[in-house]
Image (tube, grey):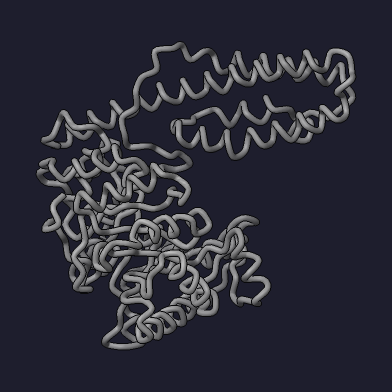
Amino acid sequence: MKAAARRPLGDTGLGCAPVGFGGYRIASASDEHKAALEAYLEAGGNLIDTSANYGAGDSERLIGRVLRNRPRDAAIVVTKAGYIQGQSKLVALQSGVPEIVHYAPDVWHCIHPDFLSSQIDASLDRLGRHSIDVFLLHNPEYFLLERHKRQVARPDDRAEFDRRIRAAFAFLEEEVGKGRISWYGVSSNRFAYSGSDPTATSVPRMLALARELSARHHFRVVQLPLNLYESDAALEPCCGGLTVLEFCRDHGLGVLVNRPLNAVVGDRLIRLSDAPIPDVPAGSLPALVQRLRQHEEEFARRFDFPLMQAGTGLAGWLGPALVGLDSADAFRASVQQAVVPAVNTWLFNADKALGPTPGFRAWKRSFTDHLDALLRAAEVSIQKGHAHLAGQIRQRLLESGLAARGAPLSQLALAVLLAQEGVSAVLNGMRTPAYVRDSLSSLLLEVGDARAILAAFRAVA
């Protein structure tokens, strides 16, 4: 990607690389992540997207570390704020931040100026910068989602949502005046939703709110999901007869696309990339679940200690969860973040209570063997399912008129989005130098009528 390959980021005057570096899962302690970002910049990339809550700020720390010795204009840094997670929960509570949305125990949200001010302070410090190029409100729809979830929606909720957005915009205009940010906008997963949806957000409405503040406002960037399955932003008229992309194009708004390779379809996450087909047998998941269940039933008969998950056992928990899984990455993350800690805690407590009991040690060894066999078989099964689905997606793309045939599926999926009129940049998580090279290669592919491909793909998907 040559430095000259730039697209206008709306009317900001900034020229951005068509493929942006997504910082969602990068960490400052990872040399590989650091090498990936450096490889992206060396290849001519200049757009880096992050957020205050990515890795509790660790994503911003790595970006600041990499950019420290580079010219100020070497990169356009986009960061976001809104989520209250980790240490920021304690800070928010201690400082009495108002208007916190308690969507779930681990999902708090706020766009009040007091909170945004503290987040900008922290982001500037972690990034090692005096100003942020683009600052986005991060999924402000949580106010609407929380009201809908708790079934306490009121007729004036939309007016209150607008009031909160307007107050945030007014504060961000002040931050522009202080030189702490240059431009601002909104990242929302609900921009392409129908206006009749009580949780939908509207680009035209947000632009109108910015214009109410000033004719010379600095609201210039939106971020939204767009991929082969979630294509409403490119296809569905929802903005006075225009699609979101068409409206943004006509009003000088830059559009950053996220989730290009991770499609959310119902309750499923579909990874739009090729997957190697494992050359080992998957094993029968129902049979392996049943063996684990029988082993836990033996434990219940022999030992005076409750099974995991309030007595239902690990098999009762994992069995239903393994049905329909199609993302190996999501499976591994769930195992590491949920299954392993739960099993380790239960075994630790069982050890304390039953350590000397005859037969417990042997049972524990067999339990571990059964669990390992089940998890291995589950991952192989998911990989095989992913490979089969990837083949079907590729075939649908080719039948939809995509000219490039030999490229990896991830490159094809990115290329279709890059060719959509109105897209400023496609953000992709690239945590290794090899993935950087793969992603940037999508710029070399010829697509044809990209909008028609999206429409045809949706018709058969």
In the shown orientation, is residue 350 left or right of residue 216?
Answer: right
118 or 29: nearer the eye? Answer: 29
Image x and y of residue 457, in percent: 24, 39
Q: Residue furthest front?
A: 69
Residue at (32% x, 65% y) in the render? 222
Image x and y of residue 383, in percent: 42, 24
In the shown orientation, is residue 86 left or right of residue 166?
Answer: right
435 or 380: nearer the eye? Answer: 435
Residue at (21% x, 57% y) in the render? 17
385 shown above or below 242 = above
Image x and y of residue 286, in percent: 58, 17
400 or 76: nearer the eye? Answer: 76
Image x and y of residue 40, in percent: 26, 49
Residue at (62% x, 57% y) in the render? 104
In the shown orientation, is residue 360 left or right of residue 388?
Answer: right
109 shown above or below 38 = below
Q: Quadrant of residue 179?
A: bottom left
- The quadrant of the rendering that contains the C terminus is top left
106 shown above or below 396 = below
Q: Report whether residue 205 is seen.
A: no
Q: Report whether residue 76 is seen.
A: yes
